[in-house]
Image (spheres, coloured by chain):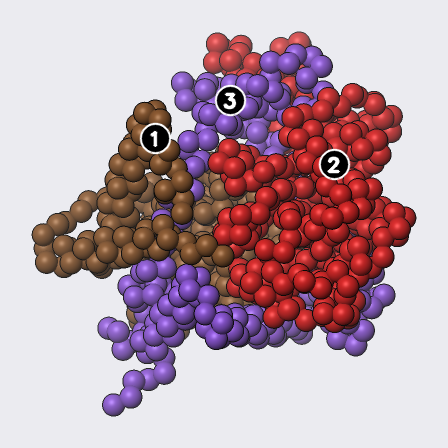
């Protein structure tokens, strides 16, 4: 097996840039600003709509096993956004129905919900029956979410998490049919065409991965997002050098893929 | 009177638009079931290249087949898998089947694939010409372990035989000992490339990816990390034509053609209606 | 004084150590380390199995509560409990290779699953009609490229005209390929950064906010 030299080099580089970014922000040398994400800014609007229409908000992180890369990438931002949604929902008085389809998420979502109510001093208002576990299978998720949508007629449907491509379009289309606002986000690239075509708001790729940082007030969190931007400039520079070198007849591809 | 009738139709359409579209879709797709149309199937370049690759293999080729079809995608992927296995058995390729998702080797392999592509019909002996190493839980970690030490990753095959007792496993300890890697159902493409094909420099082909994922395979194909692939019912039907064994995929092509055509007709009609509405042609 | 076990420090420490071990194993496949990492992976699977058992208990509790509620029997809850018990018992007693278990899986679960999946095409058709309406400049480009790609996906289109397949290949292989590759790279980078945030304890969305943290 060949030792992945360039992988190690890039990993060390990313860590170094992250440390530099964290130090810069902590010392107050830099205060980066990030573009706003329409999906995150629409959350208060969605919750407000639920309150006005006296309908619940349905939130789910879908099928995102924490043991897999895609699952982690989709589930962790989903938890971060859930904390924010719960906080705002409690403030505005909206009911939130949480649909869980990965068993590992049950204690996490329950804990996040309890903590949100605890922080607001409204622990008596928490209803444990508002966390529904569907069984863990793909088809139980489809039938469970669609049936809950039909029964509860939500004002908004939020799905930042993990899903298969054919399913995501069903939830979005059904939410639209019921007149609910919908938001979704995932890192699964094969779901993006369906996300964009059927949801009102979406978070694609890095947007959802950075969502937790953007929602938080912690400047160190936003430093990692900024470090990603610095690394991206570095990658663009490498790409440009590679393109020019390739035009000039120098093969640099082999060097960068060792 | 005509104007009232038109307005009634328009109001009906607005109220039941989705229902009408979906009922129309079901009716359109029923037509080939009642009367098969027998539409021709031109062969695409991916399918032909895939066929040529598999055709070049022989009895000395050791193929690792990563069988990860899910129940949801089996309708799209199993026809290609059946056709590919028929071709592989016809060329006497040594096949090692393993799965990292529970559905594939446990539920779909035998009743949906091997039932139609029976290795015994080609004189294959289990343990000497083909074997099923079974489902290995653990995802990426299991794949990484499998790559370096198969005996550590799995001790018994699907049927309870010890791996070390299978004649074809003698001298096969890791990815290095295989000639090709074939993936059925492309959900694991990133992991296969990261842990198997790139580190050990093994050619990697995909048979039977779902059509929705096939567009994501192009970047890997263009960079050479993926040698070739066939995806969806359409490629499966083309492959069946090449091996001269029409099957499930060929039977589904009429539905595929009509379904696509119906969507396009609806899109065009929808835009015509929108255009006319914009010009005040309707309310 | 020892912190409460609910203190997030312990969770973050476990996560950081495990992550470092896994990363080290990827770069330096030391046999003893590989063995330990494999065992950690097995532990994760066992934890997930326990989580599934907890989920099973929740489903049973919820549906039994619904059945016991006064005001009429909930047929769906009764059916869930019956079929769950039947599948569980046959699986435990006969294993996944038993005839009854396989029959349930292939004839009920698998068939219903395929049926549910077939709904996705109906939803896709209605979504496509709604989305591919030309209302602005962006949607003109969007709709025309979608229509051209869909035309190329019709299996027999090559007999009508050979032009559509090369157009689709250009759209997918040239026009949108750069975007896809860039998005893949961004996702990979985002995952690494998310991993770093989680390992260092900056990302705490999955832990929740404790009273001690206030």
Q: Secondary structure at mark 3?
A: helix
Residue named by callout 2: B55
Chain identity of mark 1? A
Q: Secondary structure at mark 1?
A: loop
Q: How far across and how far down the image is residue A254, in percent?
A: 40, 40
- Provide the letter of the chain coloured red: B
Chain identity of mark 3? C
Share a chain, discs 2 and 1? no
Give the left or right position of residue B105, taking residue A126 as reference.
Answer: right
**How far apart, in angstroms, are the residues tagged by discs 2 and 1?**
36 Å
Foreground disc of the pair 1, 3: 1
User: Dot 2, how many residues are within 10 Å of its Cα: few (below 14), some (14-19), or many (20+)?
Assistant: few
Q: How far across and how far down the image is residue B67, in percent?
A: 68, 52
User: Dot 3, how many residues are within 10 Å of its Cα: few (below 14), some (14-19), or many (20+)?
Assistant: some
Q: How far across and how far down the image is residue C53, in percent?
A: 61, 74
Q: How far across and how far down the image is residue C42, in percent?
A: 55, 72
Residue named by callout 1: A250
**How far apart, in angstroms, are the residues tagged by discs 2 and 3?**
29 Å
State which quadrant residue A239 falls in. top left
Judge whether A87 appears above or below C56 on screen. Answer: above
Give the colour in which the image draws chain A.
brown
Q: Is residue C75 visible?
A: no
Give the left or right position of residue B273, taking residue A38 as reference.
Answer: right
Foreground disc of the pair 2, 3: 2
Foreground disc of the pair 2, 1: 1
Residue named by callout 3: C170
Q: Residue at x 63, y 56 (%)?
A: B177
- Provide the letter of the chain coloured purple: C
Q: Residue at x 60, y 24 (%)?
A: C150
């Amino acid at each position: 097996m060949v030792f992945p030299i360039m992988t190690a080099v890039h990993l060390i580089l990313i860590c170094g840039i992250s440390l530099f970014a964290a130090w810069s922000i902590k010392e107050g040398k830099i205060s980066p600003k990030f573009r706003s994400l329409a999906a995150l800014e629409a959350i208060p609007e969605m919750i407000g709509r639920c309150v006005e229409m006296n309908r619940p908000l349905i939130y789910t992180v879908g099928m995102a096993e924490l043991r897999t890369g895609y699952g982690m990438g989709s589930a962790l931002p989903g938890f971060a956004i859930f904390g924010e949604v719960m906080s705002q929902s409690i403030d505005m008085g909206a009911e939130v129905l949480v649909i869980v389809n990965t068993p590992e998420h049950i204690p996490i979502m329950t804990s996040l919900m309890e903590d949100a109510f605890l922080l607001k001093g409204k622990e008596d208002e928490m209803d444990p029956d508002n966390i529904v576990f569907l069984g863990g299978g793909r088809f139980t998720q489809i039938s469970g979410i669609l049936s809950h949508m039909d029964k509860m007629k939500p004002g908004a449907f939020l799905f930042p998490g993990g899903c298969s491509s054919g399913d995501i379009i069903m939830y979005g289309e059904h939410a639209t049919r019921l007149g609910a606002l919908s938001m979704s986000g995932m890192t699964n690239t094969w779901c993006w065409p369906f996300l964009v075509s059927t949801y009102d708001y979406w978070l694609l790729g890095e947007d959802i991965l950075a969502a937790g940082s953007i929602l938080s007030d912690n400047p160190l969190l936003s430093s990692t997002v900024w470090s990603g931007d610095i690394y991206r400039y570095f990658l663009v520079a490498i790409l440009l050098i590679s393109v020019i070198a390739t035009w000039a007849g120098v093969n640099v591809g082999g060097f960068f893929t060792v | 009177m005509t104007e009232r009738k038109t307005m009634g139709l328009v109001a009906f359409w607005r109220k039941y638009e989705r229902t009408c579209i979906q009922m129309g879709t079901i009716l359109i797709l029923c037509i080939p079931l009642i009367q098969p149309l027998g539409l021709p199937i031109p062969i695409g370049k991916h399918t032909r290249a895939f066929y040529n690759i598999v055709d070049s293999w022989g009895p000395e080729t050791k193929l690792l087949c990563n069988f990860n079809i899910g129940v949801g995608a089996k309708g799209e992927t199993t026809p290609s898998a059946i056709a590919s296995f028929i071709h592989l058995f016809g060329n006497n390729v040594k096949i090692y089947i393993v799965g990292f998702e529970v559905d594939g080797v446990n539920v779909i392999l035998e009743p949906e694939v091997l039932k139609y592509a029976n290795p015994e019909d080609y004189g294959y002996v289990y343990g000497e010409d083909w074997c099923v190493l079974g489902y290995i839980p653990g995802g990426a970690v299991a794949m990484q372990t499998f790559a370096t030490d198969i005996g550590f990753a799995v001790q018994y095959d699907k049927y309870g035989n010890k791996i070390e007792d299978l004649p074809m496993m003698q001298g096969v300890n890791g990815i290095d000992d295989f000639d090709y890697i074939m993936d059925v159902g492309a959900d694991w493409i990133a992991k296969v490339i990261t842990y198997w094909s790139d580190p050990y420099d093994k050619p990697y082909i995909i048979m039977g990816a779902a059509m929705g994922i096939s567009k994501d395979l192009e970047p890997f194909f263009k960079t050479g990390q993926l040698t070739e692939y066939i995806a969806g019912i359409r490629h499966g039907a083309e492959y069946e034509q090449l091996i001269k064994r029409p099957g499930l995929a060929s039977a589904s092509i009429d539905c595929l053609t009509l379904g696509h055509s119906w969507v396009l007709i609806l899109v065009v009609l929808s835009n015509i209606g929108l255009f006319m509405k914009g010009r005040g042609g309707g309310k | 004084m020892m912190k409460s076990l609910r203190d997030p420090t312990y969770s973050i420490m476990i996560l950081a150590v495990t992550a470092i071990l896994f990363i080290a194993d990827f770069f330096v496949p030391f046999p003893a380390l590989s063995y330990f990492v494999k065992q950690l992976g097995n532990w994760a699977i066992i934890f997930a199995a326990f989580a599934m058992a907890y989920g099973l208990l929740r489903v049973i509790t919820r549906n039994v509560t619904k059945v016991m509620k006064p005001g009429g029997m909930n047929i769906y809850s009764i059916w869930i409990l019956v079929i769950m018990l039947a599948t569980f018992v046959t699986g435990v007693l006969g294993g996944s290779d038993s005839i009854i278990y396989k029959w349930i899986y292939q004839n009920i679960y698998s068939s219903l699953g395929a049926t549910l999946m077939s709904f996705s095409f109906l939803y896709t058709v209605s979504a496509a009609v709604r989305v591919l309406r030309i209302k602005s400049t962006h949607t003109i480009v969007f709709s025309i490229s979608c229509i051209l790609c869909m035309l190329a996906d019709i299996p027999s289109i090559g007999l009508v005209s050979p032009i559509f397949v090369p157009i689709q290949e250009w759209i997918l292989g040239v026009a949108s390929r750069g975007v896809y590759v860039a998005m893949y790279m961004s996702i990979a980078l985002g995952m690494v950064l998310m991993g770093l945030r989680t390992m260092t304890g900056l990302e705490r969305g999955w832990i929740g906010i404790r009273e001690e943290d206030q």
